[in-house]
Image: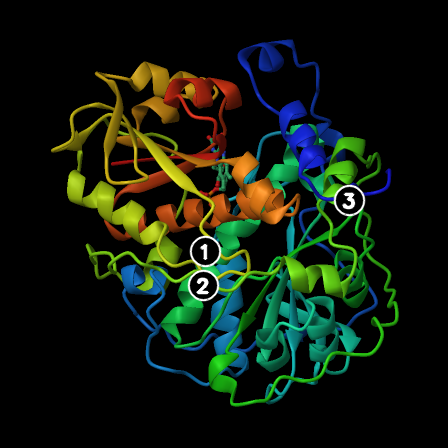
């Protein structure tokens, strides 16, 4: 790894360029998946005792369209049962199935590229009845917590984030980390992008569930990387801090704690082996380093105030409850070629892009769509930045299929969304850290598209894509971050 540059975004952009898919790169790829050495899907701390989570608090049944667009439900006590509802339905195991030639797959309540589940979940807790203050690892395999660090974590969180008040007040802050090898094993260096996409899927669930329980929450990406890694007890290379979601800060009634005067002392615990032939990708380490924030002061400067949402609150086009939708969600493996309605298309996008509470201050995701079968919308390609603006005309199923790495799901959906970010603008406004924000923002919007679609009885799937072909097709300088197809 080399020294970090001054944060112009150039290095992150280099990573983005060299991990683009194109018909040529896909056809000339020589990577062979080593099925005998598939990384372990669960992080295991053999020396730490599990603390089983209690039964989950009852479903709120709060309408998902309200929750996704940030309205709060009836306030609930943030006790362990409520924490179990939030965490298990965000990131827990939904079902397990065997896989020919590989390890069993433990499907989760969130979508994940390739079902490789590179994201780990930790909880920084203080003042929760029945739980000592500390940082805990969440095991989705056992629905149990293990304490990785004792004591009130808030002074270190506030310090690492350059003083952000929400972290000093929240009784629970969810910390997501990524284990790059779990995804690099199959997707090589491009897998670094997946850490943010997959985290976005978890965050979409978590924000909706938190809102449904009446808890304030926000997504925080401005932290001093080294300090958060040390707090959690990870090395920042084989496992990297991704983002934090403080929950329940507004209603906690607590004054923010003062920042710690020094970083946390290191903690070390034995962990189970991930795989036998684990390797690091220099491009990934380089991109991570170049998008790191080096000090609490740098983190504080990077953070933005929330961006006031000017748009009218989106229409509620379904009243399905949050928990029901999350349980029902899955990735469709086939679409019939039936229509969805214009109201559904517009309603899903309006809610999925509405009012993201985050510390990068602005929604970085622009939506473009290939509409194949949307009643009331002429088939074609559209930008959805200001309503539906037609860019290309006619039946474009074959084109959408091609853009989505020649996968049938990309062409068979009623609509295929491309979530784009103008990286040059983002770098100019927010420096190289914005690369992480752009990927995570798209992941969250993608996760919300899943939820809103399922609420309407419409299926969805995330998809990967040919980067420059998508840009050329939509005649934009924005870069595609993620694709999502929806349909019956
Ligand atoms: C960011 C992202 C990208 C994905 N890309 C593809 C893809 O290119 N092709 C595909 O068939 N499925 C894709 N999927 C769907 C996953 O394979 C699916 O989420 C995973 O197998 C878990 O299944 P589930 O979503 O039904 O729980 C993607 C999902 C996500 C979240």
Quick check: 386 left or right of 476?
left
Q: Is residue 92 visible?
A: no
Task: Give how far across and how far down residue 461 sits, in percent.
Answer: 40, 37
Q: Quadrant of the C terminus?
A: top left
Question: The residue tagged with tag 1: helix, strand or loop?
Answer: helix
Of the numbered discs in the image, which one, if any, rests on residue 15? Answer: none
Is residue 457 placed above or below 422 in the rendered structure?
Answer: below
**Mark 1 and mark 2 residues within 8 Å of each other at the beta carbon:** yes
Q: CA distance from mark 1 to mark 2?
A: 5 Å
Is residue 202 placed above or below 138 in the rendered structure?
Answer: above
In which image quadrant can residue 219 be found?
A: bottom right
Report whether the residue tagged 3 is closer than 8 Å to ligand 1: no
Q: Mark 3 or mark 2, which is nearer to you?
A: 3
Residue beneath label 2, please? 207
Q: Mark 3 or mark 1, which is nearer to you?
A: 3
Q: Residue at x 76, y 34 (%)?
A: 37
Give neighbour class at mark 3: few <14, some 14-19, many 20+ (Cα, 10 Å).
Answer: many
Q: Is residue 379 visible?
A: yes
Task: Give how far across and how far down residue 268 sits, in percent.
Answer: 88, 65
Residue beneath label 3, please? 289
Of the numbered discs in the image, which one, if any, rests on residue 204? Answer: 1
Q: CA distance from mark 3 to mark 1?
A: 26 Å
């Amino acid at each position: 790894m080399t020294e970090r540059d001054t944060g112009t975004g150039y290095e992150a952009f280099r990573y983005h360029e060299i991990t683009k898919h194109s018909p040529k790169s896909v056809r000339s790829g020589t990577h062979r998946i080593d099925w005998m050495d598939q990384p372990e899907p669960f992080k295991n701390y053999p020396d730490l005792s599990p603390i089983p989570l209690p039964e989950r608090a009852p479903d709120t049944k709060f309408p998902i369209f309200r929750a996704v667009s940030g309205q709060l439900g009836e306030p609930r006590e943030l006790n362990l049962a409520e924490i179990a509802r939030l965490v298990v339905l965000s990131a827990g195991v939904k079902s397990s199935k065997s896989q020919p030639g590989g390890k069993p797959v433990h499907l989760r309540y969130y979508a994940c590229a390739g079902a490789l589940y590179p994201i780990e979940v930790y909880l920084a807790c203080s003042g929760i009845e029945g739980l000592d203050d500390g940082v805990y690892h969440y095991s989705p395999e056992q629905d149990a917590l293990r304490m990785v660090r004792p004591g009130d974590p808030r002074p270190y969180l506030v310090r690492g984030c350059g003083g952000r008040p929400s972290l000093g007040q929240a009784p629970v802050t969810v910390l997501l980390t990524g284990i790059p090898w779990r995804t690099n094993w199959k997707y090589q260096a491009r897998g670094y992008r997946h850490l943010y996409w997959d985290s976005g899927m978890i965050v979409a669930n978590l924000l909706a569930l938190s809102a449904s329980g009446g808890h304030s929450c926000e997504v925080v990406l401005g932290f001093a990387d080294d300090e958060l890694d040390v707090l959690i007890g990870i090395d920042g290379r084989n496992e990297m801090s991704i983002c934090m979601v403080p929950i329940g800060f507004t209603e906690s009634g607590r004054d923010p704690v003062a920042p710690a005067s020094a970083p946390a002392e290191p903690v070390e615990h034995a962990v189970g082996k991930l795989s036998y032939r684990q390797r690091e990708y220099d491009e990934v380490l380089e991109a991570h380093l170049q998008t790191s924030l080096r000090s609490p002061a740098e983190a504080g400067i990077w953070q933005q105030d929330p961006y006031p949402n000017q748009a009218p609150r989106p229409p509620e086009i379904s009243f399905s409850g949050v928990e029901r939708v999350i349980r029902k969600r899955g990735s469709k493996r086939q679409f019939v070629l039936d229509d969805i309605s214009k109201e559904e298309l517009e309603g899903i996008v309006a809610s999925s892009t509405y009012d993201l509470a985050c510390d990068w201050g602005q929604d970085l995701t622009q939506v473009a769509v290939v509409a194949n079968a949307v009643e009331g919308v002429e088939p074609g390609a559209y930008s959805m930045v200001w309503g539906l603006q037609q860019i290309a005309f006619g039946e474009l199923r074959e084109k959408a299929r091609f853009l989505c790495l020649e996968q049938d799901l990309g062409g068979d959906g009623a609509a295929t969304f491309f979530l784009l970010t103008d990286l040059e603008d983002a770098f100019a406004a927010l420096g190289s850290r914005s690369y992480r924000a752009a990927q995570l923002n798209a992941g969250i919007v993608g996760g919300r598209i899943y939820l809103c679609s399922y609420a309407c009885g419409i299926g969805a799937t995330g998809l990967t894509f040919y980067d420059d072909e998508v840009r050329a097709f939509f005649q934009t300088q924005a870069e595609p971050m993620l694709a999502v197809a929806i349909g019956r």
